[in-house]
Image (tube, grey):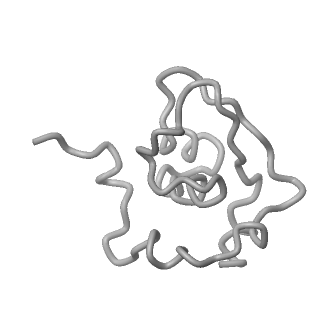
Amino acid sequence: MAVSRYEKTKNENFDYHNTFRNIDIESIKADDDFFYVIKDRERIDQLARRFLGDGRYWWVICLLNGFDNAFDAEIMPGITIRIPRNINNVLTKL
C-alpha cells in the first residue's frame, strides 16, 4: 500500500477539510498575495515549505485555490495558483 507524501504534514488533531468547508474564500484573500505558476514535479507541500516556511501549510494553498486536497487533478504544471505572502494574516482570519 502506498503511503501519502502528505502523511507527515497532516495535523491529526485538526480536520482542515471539514473545518473550512463553508468559509468565504474571498475573505481570506489579500492584495499582497502573489501568483505562482506550478512547474513540473512540484508539490503543494514543497511550495508551502518554500513560500510559507512550513510544508504543513499545504492546506492553506489548497483552500485559497479551491482545491479539495493536495492530490486534486487540477494541480498540474502550468496552472497559476494564489499563495499568501503572510501566513499569519490568513490564519488570524480563519
* Residue with the most extreme top position: 40
Image quarter where the C terminus lies is bottom right
Residue at image position (45%, 48%) is 70
The quadrant holding residue 24 is bottom right
The image shows residue 9, relative to residue 18, as above or below, that is: above
Q: Is residue 18 above or below residue 46?
A: below
Q: Position of residue 68 (x, y in %)?
A: 48, 57
Q: Quadrant of the N terminus?
A: top left
Q: Is residue 67 left or right of residue 3?
A: right
Residue furthest to the right in view is 31
The location of residue 4, given as percent across then percent down, is 27, 46
Using the image as rendered, state which of residue 55 and residue 63 is in the foreground. 63
| Identity of the residue drawn at 65% across and 44% down | 51
Most distant residue in the left direction? 1
Quick check: 59 above or below 76?
below
Residue at the location (31% across, 43% down)?
5
In this picture, residue 75 sits left or right of residue 88 = left
Give how far across and how far down residue 29 sits, in percent.
78, 62
